[in-house]
Image: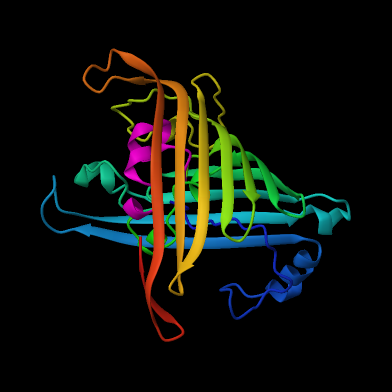
Amino acid sequence: MNAGVTPQQNIPDHIDPHAHLSGNWGGVRDWLLAQGIDIRISDTNELWSNPVGSAQASNNYIGSTAVEMVTDLHALTGLPLGTFDISAMEIRGRPFSNAPLYVFNQTSNIEADDNARLYELWYSQKFIGERLAFRIGKLDLGHDFMVSSVGLNFLNASFSWPILADNDLYDQGPVSPVTTPAIRLRYTLSRQWNFLFAAADDNPIGAPFINMKDPWNQNRDPSGTRFNFNTGALFFGEVHYRRQIFGRQGSYKLGGYFDTGRFPDQSDFRKSHKTNWAIYGIVDQTLQHFGRKTELDAF
């Protein structure tokens, strides 16, 4: 889902050279951190094999390299500013889901068409004692919406961005590697309650909903720099509630989305219908603790 990039707003004070493959760059990384600049590079490589069944037996390599720069503008300028983030990714290998599997949802969470593309580009600021977080730019809404934290432990993309949005929204939805111009608001009422809202372009690539020659539509915008505002608007809303039940932590989410664009009729692609919406719920629950470090979770 995230192609190895997981943008964070919290910039560390010091780079531990033992925790990073490339070390501290001779002290350069700590110097950049002192200026409020954190540069992150991640590389993911996977080999998927389908020895029998499906359309044909195959072995598929999938790889992704992501580079992200997070800048604390307050530390950099001394002004009461927020955080600026820019990231890009290079995707390689051969997609595994469309062929030979011919499945509706992606198998790998880094699977995509071979391209080097802009990923996210956003500015974020917090207000009201950091209760209200505002973010605007080119966003991956899969970081915030329809996410099960327990499900993300699994490699298969079916446990991250769900098939509901993957099949029913333009370009498989605003999730890696396709991001969309959007505004996202997060309000933290208490430790138990969080409220999320986003308004976004529903089809940043501008491709038709059904494209038989290029099912993912990503090659219509291989650089990730095309912006289309002619299809419709996509709205997401989600409520988070956290509580402990008999000493076991649980997280409960209720959300939905509404798309104002037009979508083809499933029985006759020549016809189209306006508006598309869904309501969903997500539960992450700890069932049992086994010592201090081991636990059984369900989602």
Relative height, residue 291 to residue 162 (above, below) = below
Q: Position of residue 229 (x, y in %)?
A: 56, 22
User: Magenta span covers which residues?
Assistant: 157-176
For this orientation, the residue located farthest to the right is 78
For this orientation, the residue located farthest to the bottom is 291
Q: Nearer the viewer, residue 74 or 214?
A: 74
Whether residue 174 appears in magenta in the rendering, the answer is yes
For this orientation, the residue located farthest to the left is 53
Q: Is residue 294 left or right of residue 194?
A: left
Is residue 222 visible in this depiction of the protein? yes
What residue do we see at 68% from left, 62% from top? 10
What residue do we see at 43% from left, 73% from top? 246
Whether residue 15 appears in magenta in the rendering, the answer is no
Colour scheme used in the picture? Answer: rainbow
- Quadrant position of the C terminus in the picture: bottom left
Q: Is residue 190 left or right of residue 177?
A: right
Q: Position of residue 46 (x, y in %)?
A: 35, 61
Q: Position of residue 17 (x, y in %)?
A: 64, 78
Instruction: Considering the whole magenta stretch, tell me its main secondary structure.
Output: helix
Q: Nearer the viewer, residue 270 or 255?
A: 255
Q: Nearer the viewer, residue 191 or 138?
A: 191
